[in-house]
Image (spheres, helix red, strand yellow):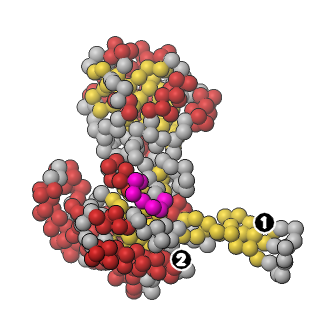
Amino acid sequence: MTDLETYTKKVAQQAKLASRKLAVATGEQKNAWLRLSAARIRERSGELTEENKKDLAKAPEYGLSDAQIDRLRLTDERLEGIASALEEVALLPDPIGEVIGSNSRPNGLMVTQVRVPLGVVFFIYESRPNVTADAAALCAKSGNAVILRGGKEAFHSNMAIYRLLTETLEEQGLPKHAVQLVETIDRDAVGHFLKMDEYIDVTIPRGGKSLIERVAGEATMPVIKHFDGICHVYIDQNTDLEMAKDILVNSKCQRTGVCNTAESFLVHAAIADEFLPIAGKTLIENGVEIRGDEKVRALIPLAIAATDEDYRTEYLALKISAKVVDDIDAAIHHINDYGSHHTDVIVTTNLNAARQFTAEVDSSAVIVNASTRFNDGGEFGLGAEIGISTDKFHARGPCGLKELTSYKYIAYGDGQIR
């Protein structure tokens, strides 16, 4: 335990020192590092795939499913995707130093509000090896040092990517410890880092609900997070039924195991008789199990009875809950009560209904006439994201470069005294 305490404190202290140097690095330096790292990933793809094979060989010990093993696998195509993602981040505007606002006071004092890094990010994730490169790129580009804690199932792959990224940092004159990977799979290490608010400015967990709950419960620094993705599609009485069906099916079926997939849909009573048989048929053809209220089951005979818990469940599978509502007010009330404030959609041709829905639904992303699957950093034009937040402080929705920054006031005077 003493050794683990010593190790984690050393990593955190190194990150803090590196963050101060990285905060004043130039955009040219950071972009050159990203481009060089992309080139090295292409050059050393064989080395990376060999390390990845070690993780694949151990996968059965961890009880990974075939789908999880596939997500773990690094192929030449996936390595090219990692390299391309680094180059895409290099193309994004550097947020650091941006003047957000300014004003000249009557006494001549010039007050500016300037974007600055958060400092040190502790990023915990249970995901594919590409997340190691993505998170490092976003954090360093936004001027933050990052401590990466990946899942044990990808340890060798993550280490190989991490070694390459730190080599190229030094070659560009950037602090080596701007990117660090926790080199132990001991779960207790996480607990130590979560208590180091004197060194770590923010923690970002990305993974299952149990991981995020643990982090939120133990962290002594701010946490950017979301717990569930209980996302809704509401079909209004004024709507294009074909468009509504397509949006609902895409929201549920395009990719089921992610946080912005639809887990529930609501239908206005005025169109339920017409819409539900059409939607039900298409969902069932796509392998979706529907759990609905009495009205839903009457119109979709293959639907099974929904419990109250079904409406509060993130299935992450080919299952969806459904309910008929009397009006838009009932839909909004249901979503705000049962949802997770992640992503909610209205399908309507009525502008007033769209305005009411977007104003009253309390979620990180509220979408009109498009799939829930668009709540994503890339799709929203952020270039990339480190995660999605359902909190209101300090970031909400997809978190890209700007969400990894704060600001400070810089005032310029010429001798003013108060």
* Residue 349 rendering spot, x and y as whole percentages: 56, 28
- Tag count in the figure? 2
Which type of secondary structure does the marked residue at label 1 adopt?
A: strand
Which type of secondary structure does the marked residue at label 2 adopt?
A: loop
* Residue 179 rendering spot, x and y as whole percentages: 39, 75
To which quarter of the image does residue 360 belong?
top right
Report the quarter where the N terminus lies: bottom left
Residue 361 visible in this rendered orientation of the protein: yes
In the visual, does 234 lie left or right of 80?
right
Residue 23: numbered disc: 2
Direction right: furthest residue: 106
Residue indicated by mark 1: 103
Label 1 sits on what residue type?
A: Asn
Q: In this view, does 172 lie above or below 272?
A: below
In the visual, does 268 lie left or right of 58?
right
Q: How crowded is mark 1: few (under 14 residues within 10 Å), some or many (20 or more)?
A: few
Q: Nearer the viewer, residue 118 or 9?
A: 9
Between discs 1 and 2, the one toward the N terminus: 2
Residue 221 forms part of the magenta stretch? yes
Identity of the residue drawn at 54% across and 70% down:
117
Residue 242 forms part of the magenta stretch? no
Q: Magenta residues, as a range?
A: 216-222
